[in-house]
Amino acid sequence: MVQFIIRRLIAMLLTLFAISFVAFAIIQLPPGDYLTSYIASLAATGDQVDPRVIENLRAQYGLGEPYLVQYWKWLAGILQGNFGSSFEWKRPVTELIWGRLGNSILVEGLAVIVMWFIALPIGIYAAVRKYSLGDYLATVAGFIGLAVPNFLFALILMYLAYTWFGTTLGGLFSPEFETARWSLPRIWDFFAHAWAPVLVLATGGTAELIRILRANLLDELKKPYVVTARAKGLPEWKVILKYPVRLALNPLISTIGWLLPALVSGSVIVSVVMNLPTAGPMLLRSLTTQDMYLAGAIILLLSVLTVIGTLISDILLALIDPRIRYGAK
Amino acid sequence: MPQTPMAAKPLLTINDMSIVFSSPDEADIEAVRQVDLTLTPGKTLALVGESGCGKSVTARAVLRLLDRNAKIPSGKILYDTGAGPVDIARLNSDSLAMRAIRGAEISMIFQEPMSSLSPVHTIGDQIDEIIVLHDRLNKKQARERTISLLDQVGVPGARDRANAYPFELSGGLRQRAMIAMALACTPKLLIADEPTTALDVTTQAQILDLLRQLQDDFGMAMLFITHDLGVVAEIADEIAVMYLGDVVEQGDVYEVFRAPKHPYTQALMNSVPRLMRKAERQRLTPIKGTVPSPKDRPNGCAFTSRCPHAFGPCAEIRPQRTMVSTGHTARCHLLTHEKAEAFA
Amino acid sequence: MAVQSMEQIVPVAVPRRTARESQFGLMWRRFRQHKLALVSLWIVAVFYLIAILAEFLAPVDPSDYSARYTYAPPQGLNFVAQNEDGSWHFGPYVYAYKTEIDPVALRRTFVLDETKRLPVHFFTESEPYRLAGFIPMSIKFMGVENPRDPFYILGADRLGRDLLSRLIHGTRISLSIGLAGVTLSLFFGVVIGGFAGFYGGWFDGAVMRTVEFIRSMPTIPLWLGLAAAMPKDWSALQTYFAITIILSLIGWTELARVVRGRFLSLRTEDFVTAAQLDGASDWRIVTRHMVPSFTSHIIAAATLAIPGMILAETALSFLGLGLQAPIVSWGTLLQDAQNIRTLATAPWLLAPGLCVVVVILALNFFGDGLRDAADPHGR
C-alpha cells in the first residue's frame, strides 16, 4: 500500500511539473511581455513610471532572457509561494486567489458529494429493477442531464426562479456575510445560496454516474458470488448492498479521474453565469484583460486541484479494492 | 416408493416438481418437469446429466435461488425441519422462513470457487458473516469458528488464511474455503453443484475425499450435481439421471450402474472410457445427434429424437415411472411395452 | 522492332450477384433496427441541411437590425384564422405588433395585434445573395409580403435582429465547427494513435502518458487560456480556424486512444499474423488489413466526439472568449441570454439552447447506434 502511494505520488509530481509548464506556456502566449503591458497600463492611468522599478521587475521575472530561464524563475517563485503579481489589481496574485480558490473547492466538493448521494440510490434502483418504470425515468433523466450543458441549466433555473418566485439565484453569500468570518448564520446563508450552483454542477456528473453504476451493477448482479451470498440466507437488500454494489463502486470511484476535470471545467462557466465568487470569473476576467500571471496561476491551481482530487480517488480505490492494493489482476 | 428401505426418515422430498421459465417475447419453457427426488441424512444423491438438462436448476429450486423469471407452478419440495415438514416450493424466496433455511439448514457450494467468492472480502469475513447471521455469535467467536472450520477442511495455516482474499489462494484452497462456508452452520443438507469441475484432477480427488469424510463426521445429506460418472461412482449412494428436464432413471447407484434400463443411461455409460489394454479397447459409442432445445422437446419421452430404440408411443406419450427393482425406477416405454420391438 | 499487337479475346467477366454484403451494408442493416438512432439520424440530417441552406432558409440577413423592434416577442406562424365576417382563412400568416406602454415600468412592450394579419409567402423574391458563398440566388424560403413589415417568427433580440435568421446562421457555424474540429482531431488521433498502437514501445508509452496528462486537466480553463491568446484583430475566418485548432488540441486524445486500442487488439489477430508471414509490408498490413476492419469503429467514435466539440465551442463563445461577434454561433447567441433580467423579458433568447440540447442528444443517440452497429458484441 505504501509502495502504491509512493508510486502515485511520483506520477503526480511529474504531472504537476507538466502542468506548470503548460500554465507557463499560456502565460507567455499573448503577444508582448508582462512588463510592456504593465508599463502601458501604468502610463494609461497617467502614473509616472520609475525606471528603477521596471529594472527590478525585469530582473525578477527574467524578462528578455531565454524561455527556460524565465520558466525556472517563475517556478522557483511559486515554490516559495510567489505567483507573481497581477497588473490589473496591482497586488500579488497570492493575495487574490486563495479565497476564491477556497470557494471553488467548497462548491465543487459539495457537488461531488451531492452527485454521489443522488446517483447511488437511483443507479442501484435502476439496475435492480431493470426495465421498470423507474429505470426508464432514470434513463431519460440521465440523457437529458447529459445533453443540457451546465450553463444552460443554470440559466433555465435562474429564469424559472426569477419568473416564478421573483428571486435572483446567484452568488454564494448575501452582501452582509460576504467578508464575515464563518459562523452559524453565515453557514446557513451559504447553503441558502449554494444549493443552486451545486445542484447545477452536479447534474451532468450525476447522469453519467447513474449510467455507469447501472451498467456495472447489471454486470455484477449476474456474477456467481451474488448467488453465494443469497445462499447464505442474507436478506436480499443486504445481499445487494454488501456484494454487487460494493464491487460496482470500484470502477465508479475511478471515474472521478475524468469527472473531476469536467466538474472543474463546468464550475468555471457556471460561476460566471451565477456570479459566484470562485476562481472561474476571476480567471475569465484576467484572461480578457490579459492579466497573465493571475490567469496562469489560476489555471495552474485548478489543474493541481484536479490532479490531487484524482490522486485521492486513486488511493480511495486502492483502499476499498484489495485487488488493486495487492497489484493482482 | 420405498427408495431407501429401512433407512432413516427422508430429510427432503421433492414431489412432482416442475420449473417454468418465462420470457417476455417467447413461449414459456418448462426446464424441469415432474421430478421426484428424496434425500436422506448421511446419504448422497448424485444428479447426473449433460449441461442444460436442468440439474442445476433443480438444485437451485431447493434453495429458491432461481432467477426472477422462473416459477415452480406445480409440485412440492417438502423439507423436514424436525417440527414438521415445510413446503419450500410455496415459500416466498426472500421470506424470513426461507432465509432461515438457506445457509443454516441447507447450504450450497458452487462450481467456480473463484467467481463464487466475493473478490473484495477476505475469506474469513465471508465465512464469519454466515455464522453471525444464523448462530448469533459475535464477531470474535465467529472468527474462532471460522478458523477451526478452515482447519477442518484442510486449509493449512487457517488463522492467517482467514485474512486472505480469494485471489491469493489456489483453486483447491478456494473450494475448501467454500466448503467451510457451506458447513459453517452444520447444515442438514449440502448441495454441491459440480464442485470439482473447475479443479484439476488431483485436487478433484482431494475435494471428493474431503466431502465424503465431512459427510461421515456431520451426517448430512448431500445432493451432488455432476456430469462425471466417475465422480458419481466415487461419492454417490443413489443416482438420478436427468435428460432435458426429465429424471429418466433413478435408484441405487450400484443397481443403476450394473443394469441401466433407460437407453439414455445406457448410452451415457457407453460413452465413458474404461481403462483397458490397447488391444482390448472398444470404440466408445457417443450418443448420436445433439440435445434438442427445450422448445423442441417432444411431448413424450425427451430422449425420443436420439434414442436408438424409439418406437410408436415414444414421441407422443410420456412414459410413466416404472419400478425395475427395489428402489430403481426408470421412465421408458420399453419397460412397459416389453413385447414390442424391444431391443431389436 | 514492332511489337505485334495481338487481338486478344478478353473474356467478359460477368459480375455474379451473390449474397455478399459490404461491411457498411451490414452495419446499415443493424443500424436500422435501432429506432432511436434512426430518428436521431434524421434530426441530425435536417440540422446539417439547415446549416448548408442557411442563406436560403433564413428570412433576413442575420445582421439586419431594426431599432423599432427591439425584443419583439415571437410571432409564431399561424395557418388557420376566422375572418371578421365569419369566413375562414387558410394559409400561413403572422400577426403584426402593436406597442403598449407598461404603466408601472413605463417601458414600451410589444403585443401581437391579432386584428392585423400579415400573410407569409414561400419562395419570395429577395435581394440577391450567394448560397453557401458561391451560388447566386435571389429567392428566399419564406417572407412577408412587404419586406418592411416585421417578420419575427422566433422573436427579436436587443437590436431588433431576427432570432430565427440568426439561429439558422448560428447552426451553420456551430455544426461546422463541430465537424471541422472532429476532422482535425481525427487526423491527429489516427496518425498519432495509429503509430503508437502499431509500433508500441517508447513512442506508445510517451503518447499514452501525454493523452492521460491532457485528459486529467480541466479543459475549459485550458481552452480559455489558449483562446485568450488570440490577437483581437484577427478576422472572423482566422478566429474560426483558431478555435477549431484549439478544440482539437484536446479533442484528438480520445480518438487517439480508440485508434491505439483497436491497433493493439488487431495486432495480435491471426489474420494480421498471416499477412506478416506472407511478407506483406507494414504499410500494406495497416492499410489493407487493419484499417478496413476498424473504420466503422472510428466513424462511430468520431460521431460521438462531435457533441463535445459543439458544447465546447458554445461554452467558449458564451464566455466571450471563443467566436466573436459578428460571427453568429449558438454560443454567441446565448451570450445575449446571460443577463437574467433580459432573459425574463425575452425568454425566447434561450432558443439556441434548445437547439444545442436537441442536436447533442441526437448526435449521442446516433453515435451510440453507430457504435452498436459497428460492434454488435461490443457491449
Image (cartoon, rainbow, N blue to C red):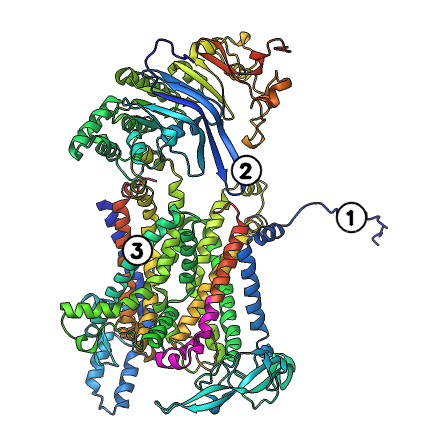
Residue A212: percent from the left, percent from the top? Answer: 38, 52
| Residue at the disc numbered 2 | B27
Residue C201 shows in this picture: yes
* Disc 2 and disc 3 in contact, CB within 8 angstroms: no
Highlighted range, magenta: C330-357
How crowded is the residue under tag 3: few (<14 C-alpha within 10 Å), some, or many (20+)?
Answer: some
| Residue at the disc numbered 3 | A116
Q: CA distance from mark 3 to mark 1?
A: 64 Å
Point 25% across, 32% down: residue: B130
Query: Disc 2 is attached to a residue of which chain?
Result: B
Q: Nearer the viewer, mark 2 or mark 3?
A: 2
Point 53% across, 47% down: residue: C376
Residue C213 shows in this picture: no
Residue A137: percent from the left, percent from the top? Answer: 42, 56
How crowded is the residue under tag 1: few (<14 C-alpha within 10 Å), some, or many (20+)?
Answer: few
User: Could you say whether the residue bearing mark 3 is in a helix, strand or loop?
Assistant: helix
Q: Amino acid at mark 2?
A: Ala
Q: Specify whether residue C356 is painted magenta.
A: yes
Q: CA distance from mark 1 to mark 2?
A: 47 Å
Q: Nearer the viewer, mark 3 or mark 1?
A: 3
User: Could you say whether the residue bearing mark 1 is in a helix, strand or loop?
Assistant: loop
Q: Amino acid at mark 1?
A: Val
Magenta span: predominant SS is helix
In this rendering, would A323 be left or right of B1?
Answer: left
Point 25% across, 70% down: residue: A193
| Residue at the disc numbered 1 | C14
In this rendering, would B330 be left or right of C341?
Answer: right
In this rendering, would C192 be left or right of C91?
Answer: left
